[in-house]
Each structure stands twice: as C-alpha cells, then as structure tokens.
Image (tube, rainbow, N blue to C red):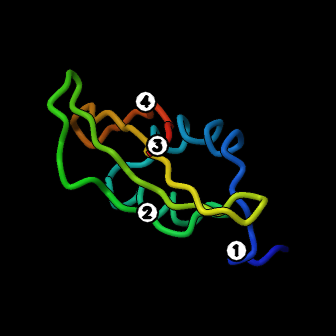
Amino acid sequence: MEDKKGAAVDFEVLAGKLPAAIASLRSLAAIETWLKSQPGVRAVQLGDYLLKSNPPQRDFIIEAQTADGATVRKTIHVFELGEQQFQFHQLRDA
C-alpha cells in the first residue's frame, strides 16, 4: 500500500467519487474529513462564506500533489440542500 505522503491525486478518479461521497455524508465536517482521506490530498479548507445561490453553495479548497510532484489547488463546489443533505456541483481550478 502506497504511503499517503507519497501519493498523487488523480483528479479524474476524485471527480468520479465526489457525487456519491458528498450525497452520502451528512455534515460539512464529514465532507472535509472524507476529502482529507483521499490519496494525494494534502490540505482541505472550507470557505468561510456561504454563496447565497439557489440552492446555497459552499466551497472546499483542496491542496493536492500531482504525479509530477507539483502542488495544485482546486475548488470543490457543494450545494447545501437542507436537512443535512449535500450535492456535489463542480470541481475546478482554484
């Protein structure tokens, strides 16, 4: 098993996992914990604001290591659907 410190993030794989994972989790803290557990993810930060869209949106900023050793930042947009329900919206460059 590869050590997480030496792991690289595969954004295609991560993007494929995000919809089901986020839909199954019931808190922003649980989403943050799940993101931190993904290979190659070095840091996760929840944006300190709620975008008042319809539905409201929260942003997680992740810092991850790519296969070539570079560090990249990505933003994960998550809709808050109410009653502890969340929906993945988008993964984009930070």
Q: Distance between the Cα atoms at labels 4 and 3? A: 10 Å
Circle nearer the viewer, 3 or 2? 2
User: In this rendering, would 71 be left or right of 87?
Assistant: right
Asked whether the residues under the numbered discs 2 and 4 touch, taking CB atoms below 8 Å apart as contact, a structural biologist would say: no
Q: Distance between the Cα atoms at labels 1 and 3? A: 21 Å
Residue 49 percent coordinates (x, y): 17, 48
User: In this rendering, would 24 be left or right of 10?
Assistant: left
Secondary structure type for disc 1 = helix
Secondary structure type for disc 4 = strand
- Residue at numbered disc 1: 4
Residue at x 28% of width, y 42% of height:
58
- Residue at numbered disc 3: 22
Residue at x 38% of width, y 51% of height:
60
User: In this rendering, would 54 be left or right of 72?
Assistant: left
10 Å crowding of disc 2: few (<14), some (14-19), many (20+): many
Please tell me how many numbered marks the rendered image carries: 4
- 49 vs 68: above or below: above
Residue at x 38% of width, y 38% of height:
77
Circle nearer the viewer, 4 or 3? 4
- Residue at numbered disc 2: 44
Label 4 vs 1, first from the N-terminus: 1
Instruction: Say what amino acid the circle numbered 2 marks.
Output: Val
Disc number for residue 89 = 4
Q: Residue furthest right?
A: 1
Residue 9 percent coordinates (x, y): 69, 56
- 60 vs 91: above or below: below
